[in-house]
Structure formats: C-alpha cells, structure tokens
Image (spheres, coloured by chain):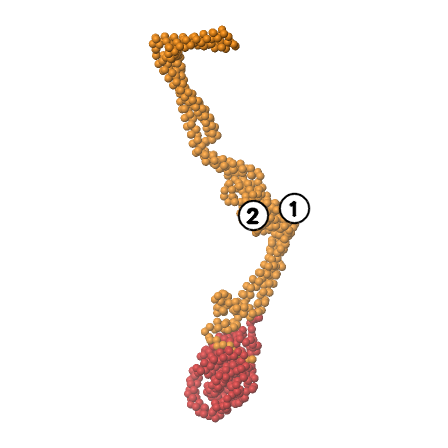
Chain colours: A orange, B red
Amino acid sequence: MKKLGILLDETTIINFPHLWKLLRRYGFLAIIVPLIAIGYGGKQYIEQNNIFMLQKSFVYSSADAGGGGGAMAIMARMGGGDEGEGMSPGEVTSLVQNLDFLQSFAEKLYVHPQLNRMIFTGLNGKEVVTSRILFSSCGESKECKIKVLRNTVAGFISIKMDPALSKKYWVEVKTLDSFTTRELISLVVEEIVRTRRVTQKRKMNEQIKVTEGLIEKKRKELNGIDVYALKQKKKELEDELDQITNKMNSYGREYQNKNIQLSYMESKLKKTKETAEKDINISEKDKITKRVLIQSRIEKVRKDIDAIKILSDQIGEKDKAILAQLEKKKRQLETELKKIGLGARSAGYTMEFLDQKDKEKEVTEFDYQVLSKQVIKINREYKKYEAMKKEVTQEIIKINNTFEQIAPILESIKLLEAKAAQLRLVETTVVSDLIFDIEMGGMRVYKKASVVKIVLFSITLSLFLLFLGILLRYLIDDRILDEAELEKTFDGITIIGSTPDFD
Amino acid sequence: MGSEKEWNDIHELDESSEMMEAQAKQESDKSLKLVGDPSRKKKKSNKYFYKVANHHELFKIGRSFHTDYVNGVSSFAIASTGYQTSQQKTILGLASFFDHKEDLRIGIISDNLYDCVFKNIVKTSDTFEYEYDDSGVKIEIHNFHDHFEFIDFNKLIRITNRKKVDSVEDFIEQIVDQYDIVFWDVPELFKIENDSEAYFPYIMKYESISIIVTQKLSKKADIDEIKQFFIGYGINLKGLLFDEHTHQNKEAENNPIKSKKPWWRIF
C-alpha cells in the first residue's frame, strides 16, 4: 500500500507528476495502449452499419397554436383534467411507441406490396434480415407475423422534439436500407394522422357520453318537476295578474270618480233639501214679482230698441221719435226698478232658485241613490279582484321559489346540453391535430457512432487503460524510481544523499 | 555462525591474542614497510576530489560520514544490489572527501580492484607488500600517492580461507588498525551467502553499512534482503544512498542471477 500512497496526493488526489514519471518510465505501455485503443475504436467504427434516415416534421396544433385542434382543445378544457392542456411533449414523442399504433401500423405494413423488398435488420445487426427470414418462425400464422413485424419496426421509428421550436416535432425512420426507409416513412405519416384522428374521435365520443350521463343525472335531481309546464303556468298567472291589475286600476279610478260624484251629490242633496225647506215673506214675494215684471219689461223695451236699430238702415224722424219714447220708457222702468232695490233682484233669483231646487229635490235624491249603489258595487268588485290578485301573486311566488331551488340544476343542465351539442358538432368535423409538412428532407446516411464519438471513446479508453496498466505495472514493479519513492518505501531509514559521480 | 565450542575457542584465542598482539605490534613495527609516516611530507592534492560532478552531494554525504567518524566510527561498509561501479564511486568519493578534509590514513578494501572505477587508480598506485606478523603471509597493498590504499578483498578471503593465519580476527584487526578509516566495498550478497563462513569475520569489522539504491534498477526486495542480512549480524544500517545516474550495469548483465528478467519487464 506504500506504493499506492506514493500515487496519491493530499490536494490533487492523484499525484500527477509521479504519474507522468511512470508514464515516461513505462514508455512501451504509453505507446501500445493508445494504439490498441485507437485500433479498437477504428475497428468499431468501420464495422458499424450505415444507417439510412429520413425525417418529416409536424406541428402539434393545440389551443395555443389556434389550429384545427382549437375547438378540440376548448372542448377538452371544458371537460377539465389533464386533457385540458393537450398532449405533453412526452406523450407526443411516445405516440409511435404506443402498442395500438404499432399494431395497426404492422397490419398496414403486412399488406404492403413491397414488403418482400424491405430489409428489417436491426440497427446494430450484422446479417441481412428480409421479411422471409423475419417470418420464418411463424409458419402460416398471420397474427404471429404481424406481431413479429410490430416488434421489429418499433426500433426503426421514433419521434423527436425540435430543439429550437416548441410544438414542432420530427418523425424519424432509420433502417439499414434506403428503400425500406423511404417506404416506411410515408406509411408511418399516414398511420399517425389516421390514428390521431381516430383517437380524437374516440375521446369526443367518450366526452359526449359522459356529458349525457351528467345531464341525465341532473334531470333526476329535479324530482319530476316539469319545468316547461311550470314556466307556462307562471306566464299564465302573470298574464292573469296583469289583467287583474288593470281591472283593479280601472275599478279604482271609477270608484274614485264615483266617490267624488257621490260626495258632490250628497252635498247637493243636502243643500237642495235645505234650500227647498227655506221660505221668504209676502212683501218680499210682491217685490220679487214686481221686480221680475219690471225686468221683463225692461228687457222687452231693450229688445225693441235693438230691433229698430238693427232693422233700420237709416233712422228717420219717425224712428227717432219711437226710439226716444222707448228710451224714455226704459229709463222710467229702470228708475222703478231702482226704487224696488237689489234685494228684490236677489230675492227674485232666490225664489227662482228655490222653485228650481224644489223641483230638483226628487231627481237629486234619485241620482244620489243610484250613485251610491254604483259606488258600493264598484267597491265590491275591486275587493274581489284584490283578493284574486293576492292569490295569483302567491302562486307566482311559489313558482318562483321552486325555480330558485332548481335554478342551479337548470343552469347545469343548460350548460351540459350546450356542451353536448358542441361536442357533437366537433365530433363530426374532427381532424388530426398533428399537421405534417408537405416536403421532406433528403435521405441522410450516417453511422451510429460518429468519428468524433469514436475518437473521444478511444481517447477515454486509452487514458483509462493506460492508467490501469501503469498502475498495475507500477504495483508489480518493485524497483525504486526516484528519491521520493525511496523515502516513502523505506520510511524510517535515513536517506544519506546521492552517490557521487565523476566526470 | 558456528557451534558454541567454536565461540569459546575464539574467546580464548582473543585473550591470548591480546597479549600476543602487544608483542606482535612491536615486531610488526619493525617488519612493516612504510605506509605512511606521520611526519611524512605533505601529500599532493587528490585530483579525484575535484573530479566529482556533484560536489554538493559529496559534501552532504561526506559530512554525514565525517560526523560518524568523529563519533568513533572508522569502518564504513558500502553495499548495493549488485552495482559495483556505484559502490566504488561512492567509496572513492568519500575517501577523497576525507582525504581532503583531514590527513588520514584511508584504506579501501574491495573484491573488485582490477575492474570498474578502481582499476585505473590501482594501476597508477604504488604496490608494496605487507607481511603479517612475520608469518610469511603477505598482502599486496596499493598506495595511491599516499591518499588512500587499496587492499584486495579476495586475497584476504583466500588467506583466511586457507587458514594461513592462526587468528583470523587478529589478522583482520591488524590490517584494519593500520588505517584511520576503512571503506569496505561489500561484495554481492550471493557471494557472501555462498561463503558466509569466510566473510563473517570481515563482516564483524563493519561498524556501519550504507546501501546504495540505484534508480530504476534496485528492487525493494533486494534492498530489504541486504538490510535484513546485515542487521541480522548486528551491523548498524547508517542509511541509503541514492544513485540516480543511469548506468550500463555490466555487473548486472553479467550476473547470471541478475540478468534473469521477468517477461513482463518489456512493458
């Protein structure tokens, strides 16, 4: 272990200067080992198969991209859960590793007309494997052949994410034969698109079923309530309420009017009665009578004066004399009237008024009776409608309460029905959300491990083997290399110094 | 190491040899050829001291060894995991340092005098014979301009192996005591292990041992083996010296054991 101690260093772990010394000491190893490693690396590189690769890119159009899958994503989001975010990059890249996909792809490939021309040698294989050799263990069993084909092609196809762009991917087909690669890639692209469409349709169907189930469940929660009938009934009640309200309004107005009339009538009746019962004295009556007479005379004279004035175009001497007489008479009558006084006038009116009222008393009372009966009737009708209104209002309130209770369920049902309708629409128009480019890049031929990798591998291997070789060689070599080693080896013995040398 | 009887014999020999030593010393003074006269004239400067490429390091390790010398250690063994050149360079460098620092009698005992680094120095050295105790046992000593003296370890082993001397310890001690400081160029471990009995007395003279670790060549297991071997003998391990100069190590290539590399060493 002393020797190992010499190889180790406190700070750098390995004592590199000493290692370098050993390298120079065992120069043969230092030359042979890298040569062997490089030779081995070179051999590995040369023996590698040429791999033929074709790539085709596609874009995964989720909701963010706003493509044909946009509606799909929206629908998926409405369903909630992981699907609301579309496929993750891992899911996209593992599309072609899915067993269902491989199975359907193998079935398609099995019936390909050029199957016998294709080479199915594994990427690391050495011998050529045709379809005949591939199916040699299956006899006549079609399922077995498809299964073998499925397991074989799984290693040829892969999907990789574009390092620069998100949502962009590359489907790669790698085989050891250019013809096989070309045939496989077109098949793969078709199959991916078809499979994706089928998958999406299936998802839609499932979502529709789930939605319908939810609707059914919600409907059951309604406990047999016929919402439509309830709505109809509510409408009718509201119409009825409107009518009742209108009627009540008109009855109300009528009642008010009649009430006013009734009150007027009442007052009138009362006053009429009071007035009819009232009497005036005889002298007053004579005066009233005389006044009335004089007034009528005056009126008559005035009319005569006016008539003359109107009927005559030119007032002659005769007419003037008549007019003067009439005027004089009128003045005499007016003087007489003045002597009688105004009271007479008012008494005259009063008498006339009283006579009138006396005559009106019966009529007024009749009218009053009729009016009061009308008012009572109107009032009764109003109250009836009021009661009706109250009933109808309570019914409407009851219906509203019921609606309030079932409103969340109704809302859910409404939304679910809307969703179901949209899902059905989308299902009929579903397209693949993986959009492939039309053009494809050229065939690329390469070896699995590039020259750089091989060189790096060789360098690493040679360094490792060199280190190992030197270590082993050093451990079995018990010669003393230098003074430091001497000191370490013979720990405890004085190192006097170096031997003298002579020129 | 040997049986208890042998140890007892050696102890008895020690006691008697002390008495004899005093006598022998007197006599040897007479028989000894001049190696170095304390009153000898000042020696020339050691050119090898200035040929060192890494003076700093030499001073550093030299000071360390000098401190030990001051504290009483005078016998330094330098070993390695089979890289003789490195050992010899180190010994040469240290010897030059001591020689430059103090006027000392420096002895270098090596089993590879006529190869590697010491070869040219020994060629240009004056050789004389040293007779032990008038016993007729002679040893060649190569004096390098009075700076340091080289003794062939193999010859010493041969002498003691063939029991040409009565007392090995006495013999070794007499050799070593001539010098103020002795550097031992330790032979490869397998040689020692193959003839441990012969090397043992000499190993006992090591007062400290330093092991050279060669960068990228020396293995921990080998170093541990050497360390455990000498610590087992009670030899003080002074420390490790690090040889960071890349060598074409011919000894390792020629060594049948050393040249056996595991297959994965190509990596």
Q: Residue furthest top?
A: A318
Residue at the left extreme, as displayed:
A281
Residue A129 seen in render: no
- Taking A322 as reference, is A150 left or right? right
Does A398 sit above or below residue A20?
above
Chain letter behind tag 1:
A
Q: Residue at x 56, y 45 (%)?
A: A65
Residue B94: percent from left, percent from top? 50, 81
Q: Secondary structure at mark 1?
A: loop
Under mark 2, the amino acid is Lys
Q: Are marks 2 and 1 on the same chain?
A: yes
Residue A329, quarter of picture:
top left
Image depth: mark 2 or mark 1 in front: 2
Q: Residue B105 in the image: state x and y as whole percent.
A: 49, 86
* Crowding near the residue tagged with mark 1, few <14, some 14–19, many ≥20 C-alpha atoms within 10 Å: few
Residue B119 showing in the rendered view = yes
Among the 4 quarters of the image, the one containing residue B217 = bottom right
Place of residue A67 in the rendered image (x, y in percent of width and height, measured from the top left): 57, 43
At label 2, counting other C-alpha atoms closer than 10 Å, the crowd grade (few under 14, some 14-19, many 20 or more) is some
Which quadrant of the rendered structure holds the C terminus of chain A?
bottom right
Comparing A65 with A459, the one in front is: A65
Q: In the picture shown, does residue B55 fall above or below A132?
A: below
Q: Amino acid at mark 1?
A: Pro
Task: Look at the numbered disc 2 and give the secondary structure of its residue.
Answer: loop
**Residue annotated with mark 2:** A167
Could you say where residue B69 lies in the image, as x and y percent from the top left?
Answer: 45, 82
Q: Is residue A123 above or below residue A244?
A: below
Q: Name the residue tied to disc 1.
A: A113
